[in-house]
Amino acid sequence: MDIRWDLLAEYAPFFAKGTLLTIGLSIVSILIGCVLGLFIGLGKMSNNKWIAFPFNVYITFFRGTPLLVQILLVHFGLIPIVMGQTNAIVAAITALSLNSAAYVAEIFRAGIQSIDKGQMEAARSLGMNHVQAMRNVILPQAFKRMIPPLGNEFIVLIKDSSLAGIIAAKELMYWGQAMQGQYYRVWEPYLTAAVIYLVLTFSLSLLLSRLERRLAVQ
């Protein structure tokens, strides 16, 4: 295998820009996904079936269809309707956020339901309403249990962001494909992208492991 180091040096600035965009897309999408996911998860837990129904449909759709299809629907369908024209970055963030929210919703639901019901009853007996009990008693306990699956979702999102290249969002994989298309080389662009993704996900895994250990001793 003959590696063309000169080509890697030429494309290094583009890979750097693509990596920064990949990180940015992932952070913004997971933050939006967490906010939406909490709302959707609580909605699905409603005792009123008519309230829970649309949230169940949302989760089923976004977990049951390919992310690539969702990105294309958002980019060529939703964003032009809302903005009047396509925008790859906005479309990528929107699609990744909506997809992540469906998985985060299930993480929040499972985390909340893992807390003993007596905790809610005790909080209500102290005079808290449902929202106060959820915010001050249930969610802080559930959050510690949700750290591992939320971390896994963030890692998955970093890797899934590579699909944004299909709509010309200039993230990491976009530049890998650009390099391959220009020089008809395989190892240099794709192996470089693979190594960068590995560094990102491995670093995040280490960070999450440290966070879990710190929360475990508190």
Image (tube, grey):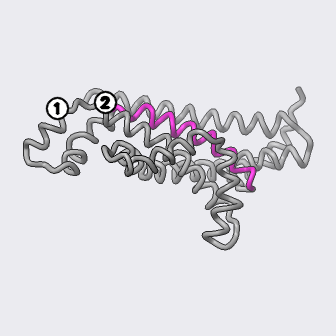
**Relative depth, front residue between 215 and 35:** 35
Asked if the magenta segment contains residue 150, the reply would be yes
* Residue 10 x, y percent position in the rendering: 82, 49
Specify the amino acid type for callout 2.
Ser
Residue 16 is situated, as x and y percent measured from the top left of the image, at: 68, 49
In this rendering, would 217 be left or right of 195? left
Q: Is residue 84 left or right of residue 27?
A: right
Residue 77, relative to residue 45: is it above or below?
below
Point out the stretch of residues depicted in magenta.
Answer: 145-167
User: Marks 2 and 1, Cα distance to the nearest angstrom?
Assistant: 11 Å
Disc 1 is placed on an element classified as: helix
Tell me where residue 79 sits by quadrant: bottom right
Q: Which residue is mark 1?
A: 118
* Total count of labels: 2
- Left or right of residue 212, residue 184 in this image: right
Q: Residue 213 appears at what percent x and percent y?
A: 35, 27
Front residue of this view, candidates 43 and 186: 43
Asked where in the image residue 1 lies, by quadrant, the reply is top right
SS at circle 2: loop
Q: Looking at the image, which is closer to me, 151 or 206?
A: 151
* Residue occupying image coordinates x 62% and y 51%: 20
204 left or right, relative to 92: left
Please name the predominant secondary structure of the magenta segment in the image.
Answer: helix
Q: 18 and 30: which one is in front?
A: 30
Please tell me which residue is depicted at 71% across the width and 55% down the height of the picture: 170
Q: Residue under circle 2? A: 114
User: What's the residue type where badge 1 is placed?
Assistant: Gly
Image quadrant holding the C terminus, namely top left
